[in-house]
Amino acid sequence: MSKRSMVNDLYKTRKRLCTTPSSSTNETPEFNDGLNGTSFIAAEIPSDTKVTLLHLKEVFPLDKFEGRLPVVIVKHQMYSLMTDRTTVDKHLNDLKLANEIKMFKLGAELDDYCIVFTADYRDHVRRVMAELSISKNVCNKFVNTVIRKYTDVCINKDTLMNDFNFTDSEITQLVKASVLTVRGVGNWWIALPNAGIFMKCFLRGRKAMLTMIRKCKYREILQNDLEQRKWPKLCKLGLQYHMHEAIGADLIKCIQTTSGQLLRLKDT
């Protein structure tokens, strides 16, 4: 996707996404979460939510991270394209319970969850564990239990040991691989390895974009003019990614004008 496709009138984009036909049910089979026997049919989840996720997945510049990260979508980016936030949250929760996506808490700097497609997370975990020479048995056990069956964002020692049969030494390996990060005594966040790389790029890019707008007269700029500005090479996620993020986080207000979309920095 070219940079010129960036947001390109968000209101038209929202309309296009919300009217995209549903995908074939053959591509989204029933999934049983393996914990309480509840089944979800992924195809029943409204297609606009899934199409929006896939659109944002295309926005992520995966090639710039050379295999060190999977595609990471910030949850509130969805709000830049879908106006009904309650519905978005509900459908994302349905996708999480259907185990099509995983959600992660990425630290105090980002007051929201990030989303990674489950298949991408599984492949990323396998790659990172192999690089760190983590036991294949431990890797396979984590993939086939926690990734495949567990849908919460955190997990405790009792669940790991009693439900999934991990030993203390195996849990230590999971912490070493950064698929678990400490939340409290005997309690861990299920984590994204190399999340620090993402957060560094994320915070740098957000600051760069907001600074650009802040320096403009009246702290506002036409979207087309902003697209023409030189984007810092160190901000790997790109202007398009941060545009969706800042609008979804209510840091920027979009105003339709005769000259095009106006982006105005909100008062903080």
Image: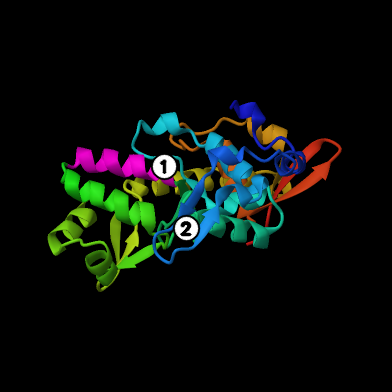
Residue 32 is covered by the magenta coloring: no
Left or right: 252 as drawn, with respect to 162? right
Q: Earlier in the sequence, mark 1 or mark 2?
A: 2
Q: Position of residue 240 (x, y in %)?
A: 59, 37
Mark 1, Cα crowd under 10 Å, few <14 / some 14-19 / many 20+, is some
Q: Nearer the viewer, residue 231 or 72?
A: 72
Which residue corresponds to the image point at 42% horizontal and 30% vertical from the top-left?
A: 64
Mark 1 in CB contact with mark 2 (< 8 angstroms): no
Mark 2, Cα crowd under 10 Å, few <14 / some 14-19 / many 20+, is few
Left or right: 51 as drawn, with respect to 122? right
Residue 247 seen by the camera: no
User: Which quadrant of the structure image shows residue 51?
Assistant: top right
Any mark on residue 258, and which?
A: none
Q: Position of residue 127 (x, y in %)?
A: 28, 38
The residue furthest right is 258
Q: Which residue is mark 2?
A: 110
Which numbered disc, 1 or 2, marks the residue closer to the eye?
1
Q: Position of residue 121 (x, y in %)?
A: 38, 45
* Magenta extent: 118-132
239 up-or-down from 247: above or below: above
| Residue type (three-letter) at the residue carrying disc 1 | Ala
Which residue corresponds to the image point at 27% horizontal and 52% vertical from the top-left?
A: 142
Q: Which residue is mark 1?
A: 119
Residue 205 seen by the camera: yes
Left or right: 225 as drawn, with respect to 93? right
Q: Magenta stretch: dominant SS?
A: helix
Helix, strand or loop at label 1? It is helix
Residue 125 is covered by the magenta coloring: yes
Helix, strand or loop at label 2? It is loop
